Amino acid sequence: MNGRIDYIKASPAGYKAFGGVYALLQESSLAKELIYLVYLRASQINGCAYCIDMHSRDLLKFGVAVEKLVLVPVWRDAGALFSVRERAALAWAETVTRVAETNVPAYDYESAVAEFNGTELADLTYAVSLMNVFNRLSIAFRTPPAASLKVANAASALGRRDE
């Protein structure tokens, strides 16, 4: 136990409201893999262990190769491993996530609109924004990643405590 509140239990209505945006994105015309690549990249930028763990696992379930997954942080240097559309989405995710630093420059916008129509770009921006919200909630309340819980549970079963 980390001593911080479980934000989902503390405010289920708030969680449900964000769930509505998630449901909208699941029904959007954007490919699921693309949405989850954006979720992962935003989570990496924000340093959210819980979300990095979850969305890496999601992408593996979707059949994304491990080689591609591990290169998401350096996608610009990964050549043709990422499609033009994926590169545009990842660039958009980075500039919107770092909005205080970037102010979303015109060249990032132009690159995005070259690959996405208006609805797709709006939905992509909702995806980036939603992940930034969940990153902040998970970081603020120290939501542990599933991988660490698995290790902690195994250690507990063996009667061992790691501090």
Image (tube, grey):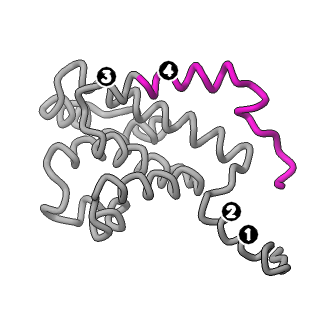
What span is colored magenta in the figure? 1-23
Which residue sits at x=83%, y=80%? 160
Residue 91 visible in the snapshot: no
- N-term-proximal mark, 3 vs 1: 3
Is residue 74 depicted above or below 3 in this figure? Answer: below
Tell me the number on the disc at residue 122. 3
Report the side of 112 relative to 11 (left or right). Answer: left
Dominant SS type (magenta): helix
Q: Nearer the viewer, residue 49 or 66?
A: 66
* Cα–Cα gap, marks 3 and 1: 40 Å
The quadrant holding residue 157 is bottom right
**Mark 4 or mark 3, which is nearer the start of the sequence?**
4
Badge 4 element = helix
What's under tag 4, amino acid-wise? Gly
Alpha-carbon distance for marks 1 and 4?
32 Å
Whichever of callouts 2 and 4 sits on the residue coming sooner in the sequence is 4
Marks 1/2: CA–CA distance: 5 Å
Count neighbours of disc 3 (C-alpha within 10 A) and say few if under 14, some if 14 to 19, many if 20 or more.
few
- Disc on res. 13: none
Q: Are marks 1 and 2 in contact (CB under 8 Å)?
A: yes
Q: Position of residue 6 (x, y in %)?
A: 77, 39
Residue picked out by circle 1 = 152
Residue 101 percent coordinates (x, y): 46, 41
